[in-house]
């Protein structure tokens, strides 16, 4: 992997700089409720290792495309603790000169509170809400206005890949141990403590922002979830590797499902969609409830919005070669 030469190295170090291949020895916050898991949670370069396992994916009491609940097995893999940030994406762009799809299109989708979605000329990852916005002070916020293709490009540069939808839900469900509707349990706001950056109030009319954030918040603004993962639920929707098929759970394989070979038409005039998981700061109780463990969403892979981002995964190299105890940078 390339070693980027960029400014603001201090900022990048503070950001974890998972993808730069440095031995940052970042301490991954562990779930204080489960200290016994210390042995199985490895911490390497801003990622955590999730042991392989079997879990029940999907739900029979959610939206139709969330069912049926079915057994799935995933092999061990590594997942970024945090969503990819603006600082990290900036380092990628500085090295590669990459231009996102929104930059090439010249416009992107922006949600305007109280109004709804709008096509905004000049909206891109450097200008998340349009040309009058910028990234000043927002280095630690998740990069948004990135398409699936942009996410794949970043992941490839970083020597990683996007997580599969099954891996993402396995993480949300704490490797099969989570039984709640939410990654943190069965109550949306337990003990009046907000566990994720969501929308409080009737969407799209009013967000009270009781959780302190009206847009994507700096990563790690909320308590860690399963495996010490941050913002897996809420903040921004996260691209997964899979094509989206609302009926996939009825016929997908048990072992390491990777989605269909292509997706069906979801909306007339559009191509197939890729999967998005985790929900965002726009998810409310009266609308998408996308922060639930079984919640699914999708979008065409060239689309970008100010509530969609991603994090990366990588295979468990430790089990794929002799003498390897951690992923190689
Ligand atoms: Ca919020």
Image (cartoon, rainbow, N blue to C red):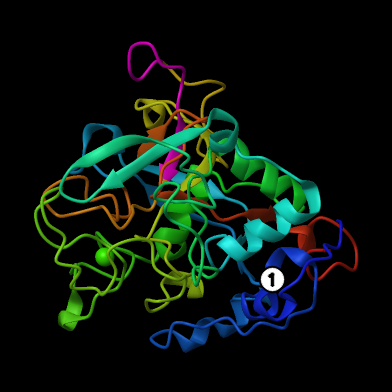
Residue 275 in the magenta stretch? The answer is yes
Element class at badge 1: loop
Between 9 and 290, the one lying in front of the other is 9
In the current view of this chain or complex, which residue is farthest to the front? 132
- The residue that label 1 is drawn on is 17
The residue drawn where x is 57% and y is 61% is: 86
Between 280 and 293, the one lying in front of the other is 280
The residue drawn where x is 29% and y is 69% is: 213
**Residue 64: image x %, image y %?**
23, 32
The residue drawn where x is 43% and y is 62% is: 232
Quadrant the C terminus occupies? bottom right
Quadrant the N terminus occupies? bottom right
Specify whether 176 is left or right of 62: right
Between 230 and 136, the one lying in front of the other is 136
On the question of residue 8 being in view, the answer is: yes
Give the residues drawn in magenta, as a range. 265-276
**Residue 322: image x %, image y %?**
90, 63
């Amino acid at each position: 992997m390339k070693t980027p030469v960029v400014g603001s190295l201090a900022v990048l170090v503070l950001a974890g700089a998972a993808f730069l291949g440095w031995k940052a020895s970042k301490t991954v916050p562990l779930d204080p409720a489960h200290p016994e898991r210390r042995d199985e949670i490895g911490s390497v370069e801003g990622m955590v290792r999730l042991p392989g396992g079997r879990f029940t994916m999907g739900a029979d009491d959610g939206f139709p495309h969330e069912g049926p609940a079915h057994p799935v097995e995933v092999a061990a893999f590594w997942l970024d603790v945090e969503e990819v940030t603006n600082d990290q994406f900036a380092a990628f762009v500085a090295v590669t000169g990459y231009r996102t799809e929104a930059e090439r299109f010249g416009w992107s989708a922006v949600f305007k509170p109280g109004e709804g979605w709008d096509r905004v000329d000049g909206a891109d990852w450097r200008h998340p809400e349009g040309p009058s916005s910028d990234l000043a002070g927002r280095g630690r916020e998740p990069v948004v206005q990135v398409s699936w293709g942009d996410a794949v490009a970043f992941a490839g540069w970083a020597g990683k890949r996007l997580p599969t939808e099954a891996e993402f839900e396995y993480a949300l469900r704490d490797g099969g141990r989570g039984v709640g509707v939410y990654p943190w349990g069965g109550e949306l706001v337990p003990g009046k403590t907000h566990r994720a950056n969501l929308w409080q109030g009737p969407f799209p009319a009013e967000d009270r922002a009781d959780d302190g954030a009206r847009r994507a918040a700096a990563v790690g603004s909320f308590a860690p979830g399963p495996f010490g993962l941050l913002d897996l639920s809420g903040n921004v929707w996260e691209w997964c590797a899979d094509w989206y098929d609302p009926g996939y759970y009825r016929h997908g394989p048990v072992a390491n499902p990777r989605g269909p070979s292509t997706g069906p038409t979801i909306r007339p005039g559009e191509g197939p969609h890729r999967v998005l998981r985790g929900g965002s700061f726009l998810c409310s109780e009266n609308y998408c409830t996308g922060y639930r463990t079984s919640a699914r969403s999708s979008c065409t892979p060239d689309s970008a919005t100010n509530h969609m981002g991603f994090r990366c995964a990588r295979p468990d190299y430790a089990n794929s070669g002799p003498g390897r105890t951690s992923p190689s940078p």
